[in-house]
Image (cartoon, rainbow, N blue to C red):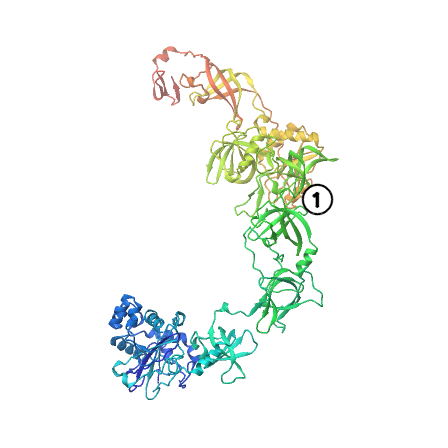
Amino acid sequence: LDCVHSLTRVTQPSYMEGTCDNNNCDSANNKNIHHDNIISSSSSSPLTRARQLEVPPVTKSVRGETEGQEFWDEHEVLLREAREEYGPLHPQLYHLNEDFVANFFDIPLQNVLRSRSVAQLQSLVYPTEADNVFAFKLFNEKFVELLIEELEHYDRSGIPIRRPNGMNRYGFLLQQIGMQQMMTDLSRVILQPLALTLFPQNASLADVQENYPFVVRYHPNTDNNLRPHADASVITINVCLHPSSQEDSPLYFQGVRQIGTITNTDNNNYNNKILDLPLEQGLVCGLKDSFGFIYCADREEELFFHYSQVQNIHPSDLKVDDCISFRVGPSKNNPDKMAGFLVEKLDVEELQWDVEEHPGKRFKGIVERALPRNNSSSVMEGSIKILSEDDEEESDEKTAKFIKFTAMDYQPQPEPSSDRSFRRSNSSSSFSGASSRLGLNDVVEFTLVTYRRNKTQYARNITLIQSDRERQRLANASLEQGIVITLKDGFGFLKSNKRRGEVYFHYSQVQFEDEDVELTTGQEMEFLVVGEGNEKISARQVKLLPKGTVKFRHLLAEGVSGVITRCPHPSDSRYSSDFVGEVILTNPIQHEENTITTVAFFSNDAPGGTYAENRDGSSMGLWVREGDTLLFDVVQEILDGLIRLYPTKCNVGEEETNEAKPSVKLVATSLAGRQEGVIHAIINGYGFIHCSERPIDVYFKLYELLPESLQSDLLKGLDLSTKEKLTLDVGVEVQFDLALQKSIASRSSNGRGREKESLKAQRLLLLPPNTVLQNKTLVMGMKAVVQKEDPKQPYAGTIELEEQVVPMTDEERHPLLTKFLNSILERMEKQESGSVIYHDMQSHRDEEVILSMTQSLGNGKLSVTHVPVAGESKYSGRICISWGGAACNTEEERKSNDGAITDEDVITSDDGMDDDPSSTKRRKRKKKPKKNLKRPVSLVRYDKHSLSDELRNAIPLAEGDIVTCDVVQSRRSGLVTLANIKVVERKTPVPENQDDQEASMGVGIITEVVNSRKFGFIALFDDRASRREVL
C-alpha cells in the first residue's frame, strides 16, 4: 500500500475484532472498507513526517509478533504524535461511560449493568456447540457501524499501522489508535466477571488483569484464512463486526486448551511430569521470535524455554532481565539438553541469588586483598580473612578461611543525622576515612552467604569497623578529657584540658551507654585525639563522664578587682589574631611563694561581649578599654600554668550572688576622656548630649549605649544603684567617653571661615536623676546694691555684691578629670614610672583643660605628650600622661596601631619647630595654656529671671536699692548669675525740677499692665526720639 499519498480501493475486505484478558486473542469477520485520498498537512507536522516513513514489509504468516520491531520502537513517539494530530472521527467510542452504555450496548445488557448483578449478567450468556465456549450479544449495530467508520478513518490517514498479532498481518491494535482504556474498562465491567464465573477452575483474578485487544482484516490478496491454533491467553473474547454475513466467514472452535477435545492422556502425563520437575529461579537473558534463554540462579549454564511455556503473562510482555521462576527438565525434542518449563514472572524481591549460611549472624574479618582503585584491572574481586570467633584475632595461616567480596558488597555508611540522641554501635570507623573502597588490612563486619550460581562463598553487606589508617592513628592517639562547647549539624567541638585549641568531633564518634541520653553543650567527655594531617586534629571514641570529673584550672582567689592595662583583641576583629590582654590587680595576692600582681585577660571573658564596629559587622570590638576596673576570680590553668582572670559569682558590692551564670563584672570605666551631660535630642538612630563641662553638644549613636548588665554593675560601683529602670530619653543624665570625631568647615558671623570640631560620645551610662551637677550656688542671701539699670531692657542691670565671691575652681567644674588625675598620682606612689594613654583623640579645647589641670595638680611630676594617629595631620594625636620618664610608645601600642609608631613619633606638649632650620616640615608652636586663676567676683549682671516671684510683678529696681540675692555659677558655661533677688530697701530718686515734671506731657505706647497691682508701663517717645520706660 502507498501510505504517503493514497490508498488503493480494496475489493471485498473483511474485519474481525478480538480482545483477550492476559494479552492474547484472535477473532474474525469481514466488512467492506472505502478509502479516500489523504488530506495534506504542514510539511513540518508529525503527521506529514509519519506519512513519509518507509514501512518495513510484513512477510511472516506465522509468529510475526516482532517483525520490524526496531522500526516501531524508533518511531513510537512520532506515530503517537501523528495520531494525536490526525484525531478521531467518533470520540464517543473512546470512553466507557453512561452515554456509551446507553448508545452502544444491547438493551438487555444495559438493564443488567444497572442492577450490578453478576447472576443476571451470567443469564445473558448461552453455551455453543463447542465445549466451554459461550456466546452473548454485546454491542448493537450502531456501535459496529461507527467502529468500522473509525477504522476506515485511520486507514485514510496514511499513518503506518502495525500488524495486530503473530498470525495476522493486517488490521489494527486498538491500543495504537487510543482505545486501550475503553477496552480495559469493558473488560473490568463485563468480561472479567463472566470469565471468573464461567471458568472458576481455570481463571483467577490475577489472570484477568491485562488485555490485548485488536482488529484483524482479511482480503483475498493478503490474509485470506485463519490457521488452526491454540490461543496462549487464559480467556479469549471474539466479537463479530459483520453480523449481516456471518456465514461468509465462519469461525470454528475445536475446544479449549487442556479442557475438552484437544486434551489427551499423553498430554496429561507429560504435564504431571513437568510439575514434578525441580523449581528454580533466574533472569530472562535473551528473547527471540518464539523462544528465549534463562540466566539461572542455581546453575552456570543458560537454559532454553519456549513461549508456549510462559504462564502468567503474554510472551510479548516478557522483557530481558525480568525475574522468573521455572521448572528444569530435559527438553521434549532433545532429552540430552535441559530446558525451562512453566515459566512465570516474579517480582524483583522474590528472586534470591544468595543463601545466607548463618541467618542473622555477622562475621568479622580483615581485608587481605583490596579491590583496584579503577576498573581497568581484570581483578574485580577482593578477599577477606575471617577472624577467629573466640578472641576476634587473626587465625593461623593454615586454618585461616578466606572469602571473596566485590565492589557492590561494600557501600560506605551515609552521614549520620544531626539527631543528638545516640545508640550504641560497635562501629568505630572514621567518618573522615570512609572512602568508597576498602583498603588493605581494614577490619570489616559482614554477612556470610553462598552464591547459588557457582556455590562460592561471599561477604555481603560489608560494614567498615576500622580502617588500617584509622588503626595507625589511634595507636598514636592521646587520651584527654574536656567538655562540649559547640554543637552544629552533625558535628561539634570539644574543649580539652590538655591543649589550647578546640577539638573537632563527629556525632558518629559519640558512644553513650544510655540510649536515651541527648548530647548537649557543657557535658564532660573523655576522648582520643588523633591527627588528621595539615595540623588538624579530631576526637575519637567520645564517652560521657560524670559531672565534676573534668578539671581545667585551680582557683586562687575570688572577687578580685583590677585595672585593664592592655585590652585583648577578639579573634573576629580587624586584628589578625586573639591578642591576650593584661589586668593589674588592685591588691596583689600571694600564691605559694610568689606574689601575683598581673593576670592574663582573654576576649571571651570580656564583660558585655563584643559589638560591631562597622555597619556590615565585619569587625568586632569590646565594650571594655584600658583603665577600666573589673571584678573577677583569679585561676591558674592546669594546661600551662597561666594565671588569668575568670568569671566570678561575686557581685559588685556584695560577697555572694544568686546569678545562675558567673561573669566578669565591669566595676568602673576609665576616667580618661570621661564626661557627663544631659540628653538633649534623640532622632532616628542617633542623638545629642548637652555637655555639662562646656557649652557644646556631643553627637552619639544609639548602639553606643552600654548593655544593661554593664549599666547595673557600673551604677553599683558608683553607689548610684536604683530600683527604677532607666531608659534612654530626652532629659536623662548620662556619663560617656568623649572622642574627637572630625573637624568640619563652618563660617562665622563676620564671614571668615574656621574649623568646627565634631565630638562623639561613646559607651553611654544612664544615671539617676540629679546625679550630674548643672549649677552651683556660691552664696545664698548675700546683700547687694543696685549699681546700674539697663536702659534698653526692663528689670535688668548690674548689682554690686557686699562681699567678693570666689567662683568654681577647675576641679569643681571638671570633677571626673580631677578624679582621673588624682588616681594617676596615687599610682605614682606605687609605681616609679608609668603612663596612661587616652583611647581617642580630644579636641583642642579639651586638651587645653587637660594640660592646665595636669600642670596644676601634678606640680611638674606629670608629663603630657601625644601618640600620633595614622592618617591624622590636623591634630597631634592621642594624649599620653606619663611619669618617671616612662615612654608612651610601648610594644603593645605599636601593635594596636599596626606598627605605625616609632620613637620619633611621640610629640611633647612643648614641642615647637624643628631644631633643624633647613627642615621643610615645621609644626606650629602651641600656645602654652594660661593658668586659670579664678578671680573673685563683685559686680554681677541681673535680669528679670534673677528676680524673685513677687519682685517680677513689682516696680523695677532702681539705682541704690538694697537687695538680697543668691549667687549661682553655671558649670556648663562658667557664667556667674544671680537668683532669688529680693528688695530690702528702696532709694527713690528726687527729680531736679518738680514743676517741669508736673507740667510735662508726652506720647507713648502701653507695653505692660499689672491688673492685680493696678499699675503698668508706658514706652515714651521724647523730642530726641529716645525710648525709655516709666512707671
Against 276, is 958 above or below? Answer: above
Q: Nearer the viewer, residue 658 or 139?
A: 139
Q: Residue at x 37, y 86 (%)?
A: 227
Camera-nearest residue between 881 and 347:
347
Identify whether 382 is placed above or below 602.
below
Position of 1011 with respect to 613 (left or right) is: left
Quick check: 748 above or below 322?
A: above
Element at label 1: loop
Q: Look at the image and tell me in which quarter the C terminus lies.
A: top left
The percent coordinates of residue 384 (x first, y second) are 65, 66
Give the quarter of the image for residue 1006.
Answer: top left
Quarter assignment of residue 440:
bottom right
* Residue 86 visible at all: yes
**844 to the left or right of 639:** left
Check disc 1 and give the amino acid type.
Asp
Q: Residue at x 71, y 68 (%)?
A: 398
- In percent of the image, x 44 and y 82: which residue is there? 267
Residue 275 x, y percent position in the rendering? 48, 76
Q: Quadrant of the N terminus?
A: bottom left
**Residue 247 placement (x, y as % from top left):** 27, 85
Residue on which the image places disc 1 = 640
From the top left corner, tell me how far across and down residue 325 is, in percent. Answer: 49, 73
